[in-house]
Amino acid sequence: MATQAQINANRANAQKSTGPKSAEGKAKSSLNRVSHGFNSAALFIAGENREEFDALLADLTNEFQPDTPNEQILVEKMVHNQWNSLRALRLQSTVLNASVPSCYIHPDLGLLIRYQTAADRAYHKAHAELLKARKERLNSEIGFESQNPATAPEAAPKTPETTPPITTAYPAMPDYTPIEDKLAAELGICREELLHPSRFDQKAA
């Protein structure tokens, strides 16, 4: 059985360990906690690299500190959807840089905008579910400890507090109308023709 001096020494040594500090060290540390198959499911296209993806995973893992497999999966969903949102933004920039000088908007631009919006919405949904799961876990742990006579302090009975219902509020969908109107005006077409060029192609035919 460890003596009190040994216990105190172990605690002091534990305080000296602060974990990795560099972005590379944090990324490697976070990879030890990912759920099965997450890394193998991450695919990258031209212009993307795994180091940036791993850094994003490390940052969100260190920020939210998932404590259960379910919480880890929700953090990974946030990483996945944030990565998809960033990808959509890069592709939008590529399409605009190639299209505007030639006064032509690629029909996939509207699709990329919706792709980004869907990824942002999924990110916030996973974030809300993570906060809810963490709150339920903490409430459960507090309830378990209060019923344990070995650890619960002696105190007068208290009236249990009523936990307010958890509501999940999703952010409003971004309004891309001003951007689309501006592009349409620069090209001399209407907004509907910008978003649905195939319809106007059929009419012209």
Image (tube, helix red, strand yellow):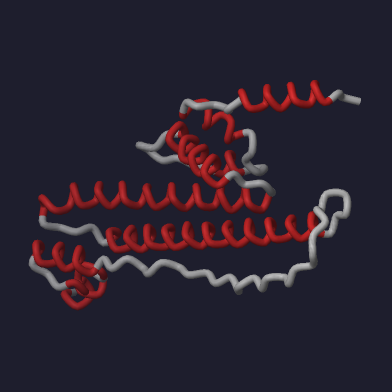
Taking 176 as reference, is 159 left or right? Answer: right
Quarter placement of the N terminus? top right
Q: Quadrant of the C terminus?
A: bottom left
Dividing the picture into quadrants, the one containing residue 44 is top left
Residue at 64%, 38% in the rendered image: 33
Q: Is residue 87 above or below residue 1?
A: below
The reply, left or right, for residue 68 in relation to residue 99 is: right
Give the residue at x 61% y 23%.
Answer: 16
List the single residue furthest toward the right.
1
Can residue 197 be seen from the camera position used here?
no
Residue 66, horizontal then vertical, whole percent? 62, 47
Question: In the figure, is residue 94 to the left or right of 132?
Answer: left
8, 104: nearer the viewer = 8
Residue 147 in which image quadrant: bottom right
Look at 79% across and 54% down and name the residue there. Answer: 145
Q: Is residue 79 above or below residue 120?
A: above
Q: Looking at the image, how many numbered discs can be counted on the residues?
A: 0
Q: Position of residue 129 (x, y in %)?
A: 58, 61
Residue 169, can we see it? Answer: yes
Residues 39 and 141: in front is 141
Front residue of 171 and 118: 171
Image position, residue 69 (x, y; %): 68, 49
Where is 5 relative to 140, above or below? above
Tell me the residue at 73%/57% (across/down).
142
- Left or right: 81, with 70 as reference point: left
The x, y position of residue 108, in whole percent, is 30, 59
Residue at the bottom extreme, as displayed: 203
